Amino acid sequence: MSLFLLVTHGSDGDVLPFVAVGAALAGAGHRVVLLTHAPYRDAAVAAGLGFRAIDDESAFERTLADTPGLLGSAPGRLGWEGFYRRNGMFEQIARECAMLRELYRPGETVLVGRHTSGVSVRFVGELLGAPAAWLALAPTQVMAAPVAAHTYGTELVAGFTEVRAGLGLPPVDDWRRWFDACDAVIGLWPRWFDEAGPRSPYWVRLTGFPLADTASRALGERAGAQDVSGEAGAPPPGSVLATGGTGRMLHPRYYPALTEAAGLTGLPTTLVVRHRDLLPDRLPPNVRWQPGIRFADVLPRAAALVHHGGIGTCARALAAGCPQVVMADGIDRPDNAARLARRGLARVAPAEGWGPGELAEAIVAAAADEGYGERAAGVAAGAGHAERAPDATVGDGTRERASEVPVPADGAAVATRTRDQHPVTDLTLPKGGAVAAARQLAALERPVAGTVARLRALSAPDRARLRAARAAASPDGAAR
């Protein structure tokens, strides 16, 4: 069995999927070590993973506090170089590289990193000749690769070059080509979600949503799930739940607008917010606060969910059949929301639509949406639950069109439940995305062939001609 070294950065939506994939790998008999932020030690250990902290809890919180400055909506935008320098990110990458080299076992190790930020995985893979894969958490990470490559080659190039020099690696001449030279890119979302917007490149292997919060506790739950009045327990059935995730990377008007709109609805509302300082001091009478909650347990009984558009939160609401209002702003969130809206599975409120009356109207409409569960079930029935299998490599080094195969549900059928408001069908198989991702990773035995790497670097016109040739040769006339 192999040794898998996993590296990720961020908050729950970035870390818990790696815990879920790691648990699936460990369940298959592999050794797994997770390298990430110190507060996630308990989640990793509970999942049967080894753990190495890349920071301490205070450094983690300081970095989170700086993330709003990366958004275009930030009053004083920090910029990527300023963020990396101020938070010691280049030094952190160097520490990650040292840990990976220490843990590495020749001929046994597969390196796995969060797409875009997991550069330590790529650097060490390059140094040691080890297979290296990126896990993409949302389609935008893949779509924005050219922009990220430009940022790496301009704003961040000096810091990255210094880290590489410390490893004995030369500077990167072409960051776009470097991005595309990864041995595998695995997308943790299903085919129907991919097809609801700009589609991912043909080499991205789709697995489905991992529903990573099923087994792991959110960071806010450690506070005891006490609300501001000292009351404990889950919100009453029929409540509205609202959250902006477990991080701080939010528009400055996000929680003020959400709180005011929630008060206008008059509906019982629970704000699930790990950092109480993000909320107004006084909450409306119908609004309570909890630092954390087990969404998998409470969403099936909720009237609606209002959230920021993180892909893990989107997937959990879908699985529960809970109508959702998405206050989408920044990074992957507008794209996630747009993909759901195209399928009739979300009401989207961009930042310019956060007027209290307009937002309150959207929340009330979602809470009264009796047809949401049927629409969610219809998407599940029409799309099926599938992963895109690895492309088959043919004799000339090119790859055939990717195919779809069913993902097993770990022995469990897709569950159908009835909530107080809506009959629903789970849209994603329990743990299916994590199991499928683990299976893809376990198949990594050697770096990708140089011919395939060159194919990925083809220009857009050349790719179009290649797709046309494949379509002409394909029995069904279709190609990725």
Image (cartoon, rainbow, N blue to C red):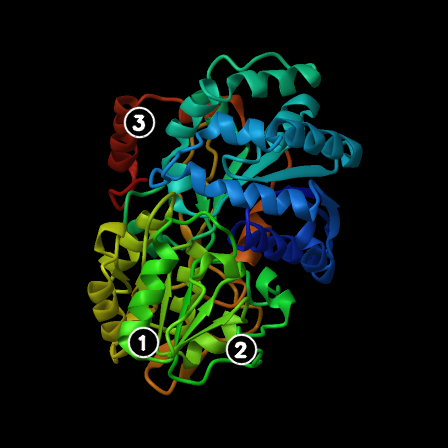
Element assignment for label 3: helix
- Give amino acid for label 2: Ser
Between 349 and 269, the residue placed more toward the observer is 269
Q: Residue at x 57, y 58 (%)?
A: 435
Residue with the most extreme bottom position: 420
Could you give the CA–CA distance between mark 3 and mark 2, rounded to whole angstroms? 59 Å
Between 417 and 420, the residue placed more toward the observer is 420
Element assignment for label 1: helix
Query: How many marks can you see?
Result: 3
Mark 1 neighbour density, 10 Å: few (under 14) some (14–19) many (20 or more): many
Between 84 and 440, the residue placed more toward the observer is 84
Mark with earlier residue (3, 1): 1
Image spot of residue 416 (x, y percent):
42, 80
Which residue is denoted by mark 1 in the rendering? 373
- Give amino acid for label 1: Gly
Could you tell me if the residues under marks 3 and 2 are in contact, i.e. CB atoms within 8 Å? Answer: no
On screen, residue 300 above or below 50: below
Q: Residue at x 55, y 67 (%)?
A: 292
Mark 3 neighbour density, 10 Å: few (under 14) some (14–19) many (20 or more): some
Indicate the quadrant containing the C terminus: top left, top right, bottom left or bottom right: top left
Mark in the foreground, 3 or 2: 2
Residue with the most extreme front position: 282
Residue 229 got which mark? 2
Image spot of residue 124 (x, y percent):
67, 27
Please state if 9 lies on the left or on the right of 47 as rendered.
left
Element assignment for label 2: loop
Could you tell me if the residues under marks 2 and 1 are in contact, i.e. CB atoms within 8 Å? Answer: no
Which residue is denoted by mark 3 in the rendering? 463
Image spot of residue 470 (x, y percent):
30, 34
